[in-house]
Image: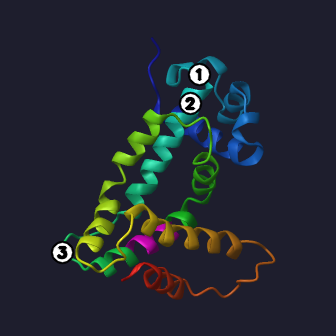
């Protein structure tokens, strides 16, 4: 059995992400991934069983990393409002710093390739963020609804505005993201 090399795995992950963003995962072949990663096709099978396994593992890794980035700096003793605004700022920072990964997540989250097992694994890593929203509901600070719905009202506007903001002919050239964060908070607070 061949030894796994983190540099090769990272190159493969980057190849999966960039090719998926360019041509869509359905159009990506193992040979295209190997060529883009600078490895042999047989090397891919050291890390993944097949193309579907590769997609699921890369998607899980990237999405879990996003959750970790979005939870950075959260403190249990801070107010729900401060935590939510920090999460919103972390979402924007993640999207700005990891744009390729964000675009891959956007494409992947609606993909029929994602297995239930992978979705459950990803969900396990979102508990810290979900917990903030559950605490806000329990304390009566946030609207009495699903925490996932509240999270969506924070994430989705930031994501959509960022996508518009980065277009060359954007109608939002001078976006004040602090105002966006405040609007997200206003949408979910009780």
The reply to whether dot 2 and dot 3 touch (C-beta < 8 Å) is: no
Q: Residue at x 62, y 50 (%)?
A: 104
Q: Residue at x 29, y 73 (%)?
A: 136
Does 153 sit left or right of 190 as displayed? Answer: right
Quadrant position of residue 174: bottom right
- Sequence-wise, the earlier of marks 3 and 1 is 1
Q: In what element is the residue under mark 3?
A: loop
Label 3 sits on residue: 77
Q: Position of residue 57 (x, y in %)?
A: 50, 35
Magenta span has 37? no
Label 2 sits on residue: 54
Magenta span has 89? yes
Magenta highlight range: 86-93
Name the residue furthest top.
Answer: 1
The reply to whether dot 3 and dot 1 touch (C-beta < 8 Å) is: no
Label 1 sits on residue: 50
Q: Position of residue 67 (x, y in %)?
A: 41, 56
Does 95 sit left or right of 5 as displayed? Answer: right
Q: Residues within 10 Å of mark 1 (few under 14, many from 20)?
A: few
Q: Residue at x 38, y 82 (%)?
A: 189
Q: Position of residue 121 (x, y in %)?
A: 39, 40
């Amino acid at each position: 059995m061949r030894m796994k090399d983190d540099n090769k795995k990272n190159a493969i992950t980057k190849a999966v992400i960039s090719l998926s963003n360019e041509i869509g995962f359905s159009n990506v072949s193992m040979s295209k991934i190997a060529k883009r990663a600078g490895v042999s096709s047989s090397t891919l099978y050291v890390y993944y069983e097949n193309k579907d396994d590769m997609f699921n593992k890369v998607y899980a890794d990237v999405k879990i990393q996003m959750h970790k980035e979005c939870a950075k700096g959260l403190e249990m003793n801070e107010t729900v409002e401060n935590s939510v605004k920090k999460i919103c700022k972390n979402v924007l920072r993640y999207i700005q710093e990891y744009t390729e990964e964000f675009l891959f997540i956007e494409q992947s989250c609606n993909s029929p390739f994602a297995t239930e097992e992978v979705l459950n694994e990803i969900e396990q890593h979102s508990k810290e963020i979900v917990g903030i929203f559950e605490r806000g509901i329990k304390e009566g600070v946030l609207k009495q609804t699903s925490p996932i719905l509240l999270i969506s009202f924070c994430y989705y506007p930031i994501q959509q505005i960022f996508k518009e903001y980065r277009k060359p002919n954007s109608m939002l050239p001078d976006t004040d993201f602090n105002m966006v964060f405040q609007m997200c908070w206003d949408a979910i607070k009780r």
